[in-house]
Image: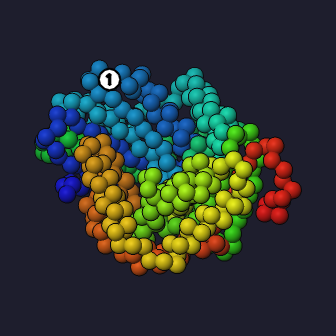
Amino acid sequence: MVNYERFILDNGMTVILHKDLSSPMVVVNILYKVGSKNEDQKLTGLAHLFEHLMFTGTETVSDFDIPIQQAGGDNNAFTSNDVTNYYSYAPANNLALLLWLEADRMTKLSLEAEEFKVQKKVVIEEFYETCIDEPYGDIWHHICKLAYKKHPYKWPVIGNRPADIKRVTQLDAKDFYLRNYQPSNAILTVTGNFSEAKVRKMIINQFNEIPNQPIDQKIIPKEPKQRQQRRKIIYAKVSVPAIYIAFHIPARIDEEFYVCDLLSDILASGRSARLHESLVKKKKLFSSIDAYTNGTSEEGLLVIDGKISEGVSPEEAEAAIWTEVDDLMNHIVDQRELDKIINKSISTLTFSEYSLTNKAMNLAYFESIGDISLINTEYDIYQNISASSLQRVAKKIFDVRNSCVIYYLKKEASPEKLVALV
């Protein structure tokens, strides 16, 4: 059980406190409810670029990292489709410093011209390293574009193309800051060793008087239900052909998401999971295969991806995956297998809560999707999933019409046999 206190400041900022006197540390986590889905289609990658810019210094502090490291701590951040999350940690007696630094960059980010150019260059280089030069690195560009036609999940977090990031101006960045990095769009979480009365006073002193400007009210279009299978073939310089099958699944807050999570685990969690046992070990159709949910706040994807063994056609590999998926739709999962995968999920949750940082991030994230109580109720949700509910949801999401299939093939492969599938 994770105990927490929640309150809202006068300017609309949500604050969550979780005290743990067993630790000598404190974690300060601030989540802004802005991710790549909030970007303009012509400026994709801006949310991720801005994450980099938040470390470039303020009018008061020229380098965000130095004072934290001098205090014996560290910090980091990540951007997702839905949120941008910043966290720092240090010995408990430096909590005031961590809070002051976050309040400072919420209001006084410098966005200096030369540093702005440097960070744009860094992000563009990251794009090339991870998406263009890396084998299979652009796969999420293809999956997103194939799976989404209306929703801004149709581009990945890093952006559509380097040209979009090159196009971002200082004015664009400043406008993004003013429209999204506001108190009412932020969730501040503090976990660790502190006095509630003292930390509440610190937070009020540092954040309560920050004026709140109107935040971006961009309406996110809902993705229409997919009603027929979508397919694509990619030819690239890769050493091994691969296959990706993506299925639309419910939003993160929906209880059916947890069923989908278990379905992906039954298929591919560990070397004894079905896909590895059947298609890698026994039939040797794949050298490796995986299945996972991408966990987006709104309707997301369950993806199966595998590297195809030499001499195996992509059609044969795909048919074998559908056989395994069909089995989940047509047969009730054995209770022993279900119990094993539920226990594994609960163990993962339990171990994650040993970390103050994970607790801080999870509290903020669940608050952002509208139900902070999930920090404690996810255990019950998993334990209450039945074999019949697994089959019911499997029939719903593994419908062929709900799938997007991508063959990622070696460039020298002949397209003649596969052209009809494009």
Residue 310 horizontal/vertical position (percent): 69, 47
- How packed mark 1 is, by other alpha carbons closer than 10 Å (few <14, some 14-19, many 20 or more), is few
Q: Quadrant of the C terminus?
A: bottom right
The residue nearer to you, when weighing 55 against 287, is: 287
**Left or right of residue 304, residue 185 in this image:** left
Identify the residue at horizontal 63%, vertical 55% (top origin).
285
Q: Is residue 183 visible?
A: no
Residue that protrudes farthest toward the front in the picture: 282
Q: Is residue 174 left or right of residue 124?
A: left
Work out whether residue 211 or residue 115 is closer to the camera in this orientation and state it. Answer: 115
Q: Nearer the viewer, residue 346 or 24?
A: 346
- What residue is rendered at 13% in x and 40% in y? 22
Q: Give the percent coordinates (x, y) of residue 208.
A: 28, 45
Dividing the picture into quadrants, the one containing residue 253 is bottom left
Q: What kind of residue is marked 1?
A: Gln
- Judge from the rendering whether residue 13 lies leftward or rightward of residue 230; answer left or right: left
The quarter holding residue 138 reads top right
In the rendered image, which residue does mark 1 sit on?
69
Secondary structure type for disc 1: helix
Asked whether, in this view, residue 155 is left or right of residue 91, the answer is right
- Against 234, residue 55 (above or below) is above
* Residue in the image at 38% along x and 57% along y: 368
Residue sitting at 38 percent across and 66 percent down? 337
